[in-house]
Image: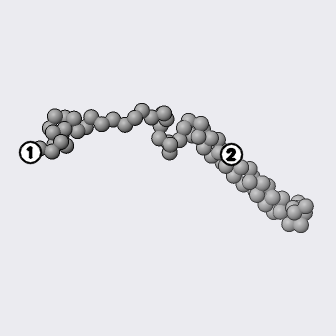
């Protein structure tokens, strides 16, 4: 005597289960376009600020090397 489950599998009905339709268009962990754009914007800001900081360091060093400014005048 076959079990009810075996009968469903033999007749192809074992895989006829469907999940209810999702109200979301993507998985919760999937970044949306807005989030991707925000990450690109943040990467740009970090790169820009890094360049500005390096420029300020180079300018400060150039002033010190040429004895135009010393450490004390650079802190005020």
Q: Is residue 62 or residue 55 the one in the foreground?
A: 55
The C terminus: image quadrant = bottom right
Q: Position of residue 18 (x, y in %)?
A: 33, 35
Q: Position of residue 27 (x, y in %)?
A: 47, 41
Q: Residue at x 87, y 63 (%)?
A: 75
Disc 2 and disc 1 in contact, CB within 8 angstroms: no
- From the viewer's perspective, tell me whether residue 3 is left or right of residue 22: left
Q: Residue at x 59, y 36 (%)?
A: 34
Question: What residue is pinned by disc 2?
Answer: 45
Quarter of the figure with residue 58: bottom right
- From the viewer's perspective, tell me whether residue 47 is left or right of residue 67: left
- The disc at residue 63 is none
Question: Is there any visible trace of residue 14 in the rendered image?
Answer: yes
Judge whether 38 appears above or below 64 on screen: above
> Label 2 to label 1, Cα distance in Å?
71 Å
Q: Position of residue 7 (x, y in %)?
A: 15, 39
Answer with mark 2 or mark 1, whichever residue precedes in sequence: 1
Graded by Cα atoms within 10 Å as few (under 14), some (14 to 19) or many (20 or more), the crowding at tag 2 reads few
Quarter of the figure with residue 61: bottom right
- From the viewer's perspective, tell me whether residue 13 is left or right of residue 75: left
Q: Is residue 46 or residue 31 the one in the foreground?
A: 31
Quarter of the figure with residue 2: top left
Question: What residue is pinned by disc 1?
Answer: 1
The type of colouring in the image is one colour
Mark 1 element type: loop
Judge whether 25 appears above or below 29 on screen: above
Q: Position of residue 29 (x, y in %)?
A: 50, 45
The N terminus: image quadrant = top left
């Amino acid at each position: 005597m076959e079990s009810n489950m075996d009968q469903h599998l033999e007749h192809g009905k074992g895989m006829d289960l469907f999940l209810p339709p999702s109200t979301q268009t993507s998985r919760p962990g999937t970044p949306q376009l807005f989030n991707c754009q925000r990450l690109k914007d943040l990467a740009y800001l970090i790169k820009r600020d890094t360049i500005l900081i390096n420029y300020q360091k180079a300018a400060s060093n150039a002033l010190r090397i040429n004895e135009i400014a010393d450490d004390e005048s650079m802190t005020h």
